[in-house]
Image: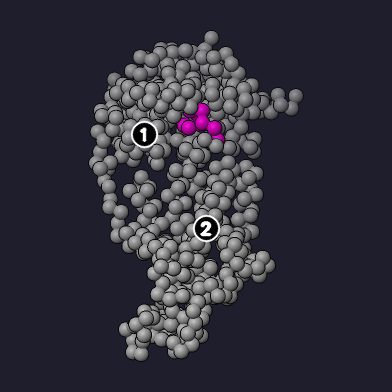
């Protein structure tokens, strides 16, 4: 009597593998950056400035992806840059998710005055242009890793709150929520067992998306020189520096930009893939 | 002494619009009472008021609901949930939205046994297996591990029935439990509910708009119109000849099992106007008592 739908087990799919593979590679690169970096990312060598990547004329095989105008190794800087990008992605993404999703769940399921306050806050927040908001915030609280993370959490919690609130509201109207209450579950218990599991796939997808966004925001802040201290290699910082010499040394700009793009894309694709994989109905 | 006793229950929306108008209704222990009325009459509202799951917009504004002689309104919300959870269960209308899609079926049946009755998980699971067999589900151990979307509508409704009987409640409220199913499955499910009800001796408040079903399952019947009780009688008397003109018209508008193709008369406008006038007069009277 169990019909065939139960037997369907789709393979994780190409996009989950590709995006997950890239992210795994990145995590390894970040962890082992000191071991695998061919050079010190900060070491300058003015005589080896603007060396092109190895497959171009006039390159030095010691610098696989070339050097920037100060003679620093692009590959080594990108590897160290991955550390910062991933720390920001993980910490800022997770914090944003925890805060935003919790507020969204409270507003959407418990409703009442809590919802009134949270919804108004979201409305007010949405009125600010986010990047400007972040720049303003950093200008006030100062630069540094913590400030960047705080800025991302502060500007982006509404993304989670809005979506989770809407989903919790529609879940709350379902009969199984009423049934759980009839069966004696308290409000909190109902929220945890009936609502949260249904919203979780969406939260996971949003979380990975947010990690990508966190990397972009960090890059933007680096670009306008408002992120971590300038001598730490970051992708955004490299892009900013590479922009100045785009016609003489395109590789300084292109490699970190492409890595950034690939990483952000991978995060969002990974999230969508996970959502599909874990949602029992979509699966 | 009836098990469920509703007295003069008023439920209204926040803006004051009445949804239930001084509804009184009794269900004796082991009795099957049908609650009929057209769509929007407030049948589900009565069930929801008893179960304490009224929508946010609706509030109880008067009257009392007694369960086994105990007034529910005097209990704390937690005590009330406990009381309801242990003694009353619901078979909902739509088996599609009544099971949580992201949880396996097993825990959804055993929740109540563990939460309210404090059973051990293993005991509760053994009981759930027994119940699934009782509602004629094959391979119950596999069904326990399945997600709801892997099961057909009829299967889900069987599961919900098993779940409703799990804690041996004294009263089950079945809110149009067969309307979402196709005709052949409807018959099976109805038979199953009846069989289970008789075996367990559970009282049943059976909400429906199908008088044909009523004759097969219920001993007594309450007719509701616009949130007001129009008629309250036992089944034999009702089918012999209802006393209210609206009930008579309703009965005339129902296909007979003996003569399914026989001519049907829709409820005439004159009857609707009369009953609407009755409701208006009642509302005017209510206003008077409030002002006085
Ligand atoms: N969430 C709600 N907010 C406001 N009004 C509601 C809400 N739910 C139901 N109502 C109103 O309450 C009245 C009674 O609804 P109820 O669901 O009890 O009808 P019913 O008799 O069960 O009908 P049906 O046979 O269609 O299930 C209807 O007029 C409906 O419009
Ligand atoms: Mg209804």
Between marks 2 and 1 in the image, the one whose residue lies nearer the viewer: 2
- Residue B122 x %, y %: 38, 25
Q: Quadrant of residue A225?
A: bottom right
Q: Residue at x 41, y 57 (%)?
A: A271
Mark 2, Cα crowd under 10 Å, few <14 / some 14-19 / many 20+, is some
Q: Quadrant of residue A154?
A: bottom right
Tag 2 and tag 1 share a subunit: no
Q: Chain of mark 1?
A: B
Q: Residue at x 40, y 29 (%)?
A: B109
What is the number of the mark on residue B105?
Answer: 1
- Say above or below: B67 vs A191: above
Residue A182, magenta (yes or no): yes
- Say above or below: B131 vs A195: above
Which one is nearer the viewer's eye here, A76 or A6? Answer: A76
Indicate left or right for A167 with B127 as reference. Answer: right
- Residue B144 x %, y %: 33, 32
Q: Residue at x 57, y 70 (%)?
A: A228
């Amino acid at each position: 009597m169990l019909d065939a739908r139960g037997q369907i087990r789709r393979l994780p799919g190409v996009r989950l593998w590709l995006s997950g593979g890239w992210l795994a590679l990145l995590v390894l690169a970040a962890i082992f950056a000191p071991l695998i970096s061919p050079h010190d990312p900060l070491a300058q060598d003015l005589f080896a400035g603007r060396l092109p990547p190895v497959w171009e004329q006039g390159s030095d095989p010691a610098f696989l992806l070339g050097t920037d105008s100060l003679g620093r190794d692009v590959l080594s800087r990108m590897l160290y840059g991955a550390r910062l990008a991933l720390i920001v992605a993980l910490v800022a993404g997770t914090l944003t998710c925890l805060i935003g999703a919790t507020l969204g769940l409270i507003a959407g399921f418990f409703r009442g005055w809590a919802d009134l306050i949270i919804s108004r806050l979201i409305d007010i927040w949405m009125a600010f242009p986010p990047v400007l908001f972040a720049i303003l915030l950093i200008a006030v609280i100062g630069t540094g890793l913590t400030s960047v993370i705080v800025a991302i959490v502060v500007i982006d919690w509404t993304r989670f709150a809005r979506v989770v609130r809407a989903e919790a509201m529609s879940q709350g109207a379902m009969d199984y929520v009423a049934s759980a209450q009839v069966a004696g579950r308290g409000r909190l218990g109902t929220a945890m067992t009936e609502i949260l599991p249904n919203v979780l796939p969406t939260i996971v997808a949003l979380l990975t998306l947010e990690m990508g966004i966190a990397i972009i925001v960090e890059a933007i802040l680096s670009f306008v020189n408002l992120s971590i201290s300038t001598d730490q290699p970051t992708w955004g910082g490299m892009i900013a520096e590479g922009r100045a010499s785009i016609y003489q040394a395109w590789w300084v700009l292109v490699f970190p930009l492409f890595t950034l793009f690939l990483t952000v894309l991978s995060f969002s694709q990974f999230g969508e893939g996970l959502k599909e994989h874990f949602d029992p109905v979509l699966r | 002494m009836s098990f469920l006793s509703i007295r003069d229950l008023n439920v209204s929306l926040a803006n004051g619009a009445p949804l239930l108008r001084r509804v009184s209704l009794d269900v004796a222990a082991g009795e099957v009472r049908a609650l009929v009325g057209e769509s929007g009459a407030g049948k589900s509202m009565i069930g929801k008021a008893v179960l304490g799951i009224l929508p946010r917009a609706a509030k109880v504004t008067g009257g009392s609901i007694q369960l086994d002689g105990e007034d529910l309104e005097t209990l704390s919300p937690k005590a009330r949930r406990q009381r309801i959870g242990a003694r009353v269960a619901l078979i909902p209308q739509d088996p599609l939205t009544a099971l949580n899609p992201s949880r396996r079926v097993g825990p959804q049946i055993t929740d109540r046994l563990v939460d309210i009755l404090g059973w051990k998980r293993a005991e509760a699971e053994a009981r759930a297996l027994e119940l699934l067999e009782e509602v004629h589900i094959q391979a119950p151990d596999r069904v326990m591990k399945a997600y709801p979307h892997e099961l057909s509508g009829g299967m889900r409704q069987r599961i919900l029935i098993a779940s409703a009987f799990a804690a041996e409640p004294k009263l089950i409220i079945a809110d149009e439990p067969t309307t979402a199913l196709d005709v052949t499955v409807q018959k099976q499910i109805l038979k199953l509910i009846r069989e289970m009800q008789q075996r367990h001796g559970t009282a049943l408040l059976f909400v429906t708009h199908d008088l044909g079903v009523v004759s097969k399952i219920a001993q007594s019947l309450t007719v509701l119109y616009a949130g007001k009780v129009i008629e309250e009688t036992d089944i034999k008397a009702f089918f012999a000849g209802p006393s209210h003109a609206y009930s008579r018209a309703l009965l005339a508008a129902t296909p007979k099992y003996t003569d399914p193709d026989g001519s049907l008369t829709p409820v005439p406008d004159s009857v609707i106007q009369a009953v609407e006038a009755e409701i208006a007069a009642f509302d005017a009277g209510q206003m008077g008592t409030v002002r006085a």
